[in-house]
Amino acid sequence: MSAPVGDAHIAVVQTVPEFGAIERNRRATVEAVEANADADLVVLPELATSGYVFESRAEVDAAAEPADGPTATAWADVAAETDTWIVGGFPERDGEATYNSSLIVSPDGVEGVYRKVHPWNEEKRWFDPGEKVPTVRTPFGRLGVQICNDLWFPELTATQALAGVDVIAVPTNWVPEPAARPAGWTMGVHQAVAAANANRVFVACADRAGTEREIPFEGQSVVVDPDGVPVAGPLPDTGSYTATADCDLRRAREKALTERDDVLGDRRPDVYEV
Amino acid sequence: MSAPVGDAHIAVVQTVPEFGAIERNRRATVEAVEANADADLVVLPELATSGYVFESRAEVDAAAEPADGPTATAWADVAAETDTWIVGGFPERDGEATYNSSLIVSPDGVEGVYRKVHPWNEEKRWFDPGEKVPTVRTPFGRLGVQICNDLWFPELTATQALAGVDVIAVPTNWVPEPAARPAGWTMGVHQAVAAANANRVFVACADRAGTEREIPFEGQSVVVDPDGVPVAGPLPDTGSYTATADCDLRRAREKALTERDDVLGDRRPDVYEV
């Protein structure tokens, strides 16, 4: 909890990747960071370099790269150039294993990698599950990462909040659920609102948009503050956009709601059976 | 998990109690159950008999009653008369202790009592915290209870879902939060949507309305289905209303989202540090 904390200008970048066009997609992410050079943190979508709808192991192998590969180099270069932190998704190769991962990059280089702990559906064919929940000290606060389906498992957000995380960057590829959209929002936005509010953290979700191999993605990238209020977005369902918010991350250190209530201190792990 | 499950006609009753007017408030709850005699389950607000804004121990003592007191008798009588289950809130006296409790009443009588595990703010002056998370077998499915602030602690919903609960009845007294209402909803509705969707359970919230000792309550009683969709309500912010929904609780037994995904099976307790 001794990490510094302060103001952060946060940008969530909603892109429309082209499946398998890695050079093109990577260039789009670099250009998005350059276009948000005033940001302290730029969040990019899940699997931003590759696209999402893999149909074969060969396609995964063609797209996957190590955590110090060309995407890491490209993002480290633009992070240094713009003095910006970046969290963005890519398919990671590590020996025999592949992961649905996000790089955490600072102006000084790669600071860490988060491997999706809760892979979704066909991802389980292609990707190994992550086993760790790293947190990273930044000049603006402690940073955690979730990827898409992770948001549906609130114990992960609690794990991060208890570890002192102030802002959770969420690269995502939200797909429609069978149900209608309550209040017009895709369910991921509701989960982000609930998670931010229950733990008093900032949650910054960068979704992709566009339709890929007949799968539509939901857009609606959003930044939610510790009250559970969207302070940027939700962005439109379709198209490339960026939403930005000036966030005082000190607010995430204030877990007390009244002189008697504290969102972390009032937890009852003695009662939960989880 | 061997409990029966089936269709349930669920009513969430939004009342406007008058502080300290216990006979009047109790009668209003009985009349509300009679008016919903076709319901399988009627949910009443938190502290429905007493009102909420206590200012002294004497006021609590005057309102509190044992779990087999006059409110239990009144609700058991009307439950038998209407062949309805009831979950409703009252201040409970048990020896030296007092609890912010909810009775669980069947047509056969009192089936259990749930004591609020996460008391809020000044409640901590008046009430002891609950220590148990009972679940009750009903003809329409397994029933759990939360009270108001409990909804902000997702591990409680997970505890209930893992115990086989199909529907969570939530007597509540939501008060405004400092922030705006995203999508027009008080934050409790967002928490109910997220909890129902993440665990694939029904969540039926009966809120009170009205202003008491200058504290306004939020109304917006709601029934949320396992997709996270409000299937009844949110009701208006002010006034007495009832929202009803025909719920197929079998849907809460379907935790699989795809052939590869299961909302309970995909949890990662090996990774969470909560």
Image (spheres, coloured by chain):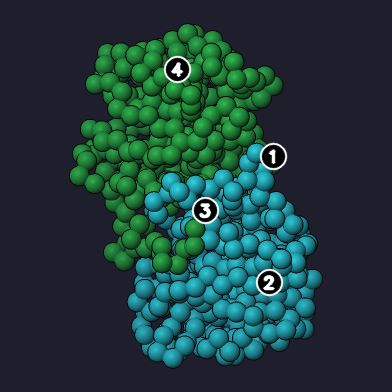
Chain colours: A cyan, B green
Q: Are marks 3 and 4 on the same chain?
A: no
Place of residue A52 in the rendered image (x, y in percent of width and height, measured from the top left): 46, 74
In whole angstroms, how far apart are the C-alphas of marks 1 and 3?
Answer: 27 Å
> Which corner quadrant of the image does residue A169 belong to?
bottom right
How far, Cα to Cα, is label 1 from label 2?
A: 29 Å
Q: Position of residue B24 (x, y in %)?
A: 49, 8
Q: Chain of mark 1?
A: A
Q: Is residue B120 visible?
A: yes
Kindly identify which numbered label has been placed on residue B65.
4
Mark sitting on residue A259 = 1
Q: Chain of mark 3?
A: A
Amino acid type indicated by mark 2: Arg
Which residue bears the numbered disc 2?
Answer: A137
SS assignment at label 2:
strand
Where's residue B2, x and y in %? Answer: 20, 44
Is residue A218 depicted above or below A47 in this figure? above
Secondary element under disc 1, as helix, strand or loop, is: loop
Label at residue B32 = none
Which numbered disc, 1 or 3, marks the residue closer to the eye?
A: 1
Q: Are marks 4 and 2 in contact (CB under 8 Å)?
A: no
Give the number of the mark in front: 4 or 2: 4
The vertical placement of B74 against A119, above or below, is above
How many marks on residues? 4
* Label 2 or label 3, whichever comes before in sequence order: 2
- Is residue B47 or residue A229 the one in the foreground? B47
Which disc, if any, is residue A191? 3
CA gap, disc 1 and disc 4? 29 Å
User: Decide: marks 1, 3 in contact (CB < 8 A)?
Assistant: no
